[in-house]
Image (spheres, rainbow, N blue to C red):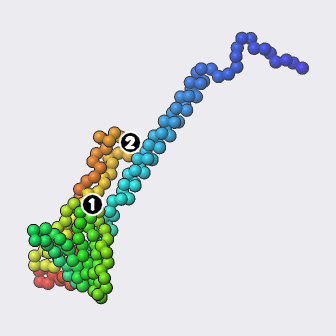
C-alpha cells in the first residue's frame, strides 16, 4: 500500500480570496432579501391604509340609488343657513335621511309602515364639507361632498418620509341627481 505524500509546508483549506468572494456573495444576497422585505412591508402598510378609506364609487352608487328611488328629495337647513340633512321621501324603503356628524356622513331610514327607524349607519368617513341645493326651476338635486383620503405614494421604493409627499389629499365629488318623481317638466 502506498502512503499519501506528506505536505511539504503547505496547508489545506480555503484561501483568503475565496473566503472574501463567498462573504461578498452572501452579503449581496442578504441586501437583496432586505430590500424585498422593506418593499413588501411598505406595500402592506399602504394596502392596509387603503382598506380604511371609504369606497367612494360604492357610496356614490348608494346615494344615487336612494335619490333616484325616491319621489322627491330636498335639503334641510339649520337656522344659520348651513346644511343639516338631506331627505328623500316616497322611496320603497320609506324616508331616507343623510346627516353629517363630525367628519362622517350617516344614512338612516324611517320606514313608511310605522316601524321604528333603523339606527344611523356610517356611509362616508372623512367628510370635511358638504352642500346640497335644488337647482331652481327643476327637480335636480345638486349635492357636493368634500372629503379626505389617503394618497398614493409617488414611488414604490422606500424613501425618506420627507420625500414621500402628503399622506392625505382633499377631493370633491359633485352629483346632479333627479328623483323619479322630480320631472323636469317644460324646462328641458
Q: Does residue 32 appear to the left or right of 136 in the view shown?
A: right
Residue farthest along the front direction in this orientation:
116
Q: Does residue 40 appear to the left or right of 100 in the view shown?
A: right
Structural distance between the alpha carbons of marks 1 and 2 = 27 Å
Q: Residue at (31%, 82%) from the top-left corner?
A: 116
- 174, above or below 155, in the image: below
Q: Residue at (29%, 57%) from the top-left corner?
A: 149
Secondary structure category for the residue under label 1: loop
Say if mark 1 contacts mark 2, CB within 8 Å. no
Secondary structure category for the residue under label 2: loop
Q: In this orientation, does residue 180 appear?
A: no
Circle 1 packing at 10 Å, graded few (<14), some (14-19), many (20+), is: some
Ranked by sequence position, the earlier of labels 1 and 2 is 1
Q: Residue at (82%, 18%) from the top-left corner?
A: 4
- Can you identify the residue that label 1 sits on? 126
Percent x, y for residue 111? Answer: 29, 83
Q: Quadrant of the N terminus?
A: top right
Q: In this orientation, does residue 184 appear?
A: yes
Q: Residue at (56%, 26%) from the top-left corner?
A: 21
Q: Does residue 5 appear to the left or right of 68 in the view shown?
A: right
- Can you identify the residue that label 2 sits on? 158
Q: Nearer the viewer, residue 134 or 86?
A: 86
- Quarter of the figure with residue 104: bottom left
- Quarter of the figure with residue 188: bottom left
Percent x, y for residue 34? Answer: 48, 39
- 36, above or below 129, in the image: above
Amino acid at each position: 500500500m502506498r502512503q499519501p505524500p506528506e505536505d511539504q509546508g503547505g496547508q489545506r483549506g480555503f484561501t483568503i480570496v475565496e473566503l472574501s468572494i463567498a462573504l461578498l456573495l452572501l452579503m449581496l444576497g442578504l441586501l437583496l432579501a432586505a430590500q424585498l422585505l422593506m418593499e413588501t412591508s411598505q406595500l402592506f402598510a399602504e394596502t392596509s391604509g387603503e382598506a380604511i378609506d371609504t369606497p367612494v364609487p360604492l357610496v356614490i352608487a348608494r346615494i344615487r340609488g336612494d335619490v333616484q328611488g325616491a319621489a322627491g328629495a330636498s335639503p334641510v337647513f339649520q337656522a344659520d343657513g348651513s346644511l343639516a340633512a338631506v331627505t328623500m321621501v316616497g322611496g320603497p324603503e320609506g324616508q331616507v335621511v343623510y346627516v353629517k356628524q363630525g367628519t362622517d356622513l350617516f344614512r338612516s331610514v324611517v320606514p313608511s309602515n310605522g316601524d321604528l327607524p333603523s339606527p344611523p349607519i356610517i356611509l362616508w368617513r372623512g367628510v370635511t364639507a358638504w352642500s346640497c341645493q335644488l337647482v331652481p326651476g327643476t327637480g335636480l338635486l345638486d349635492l357636493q361632498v368634500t372629503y379626505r383620503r389617503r394618497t398614493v405614494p409617488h414611488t414604490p421604493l422606500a424613501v425618506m418620509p420627507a420625500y414621500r409627499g402628503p399622506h392625505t389629499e382633499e377631493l370633491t365629488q359633485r352629483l346632479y341627481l333627479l328623483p323619479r318623481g322630480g320631472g323636469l317638466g317644460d324646462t328641458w
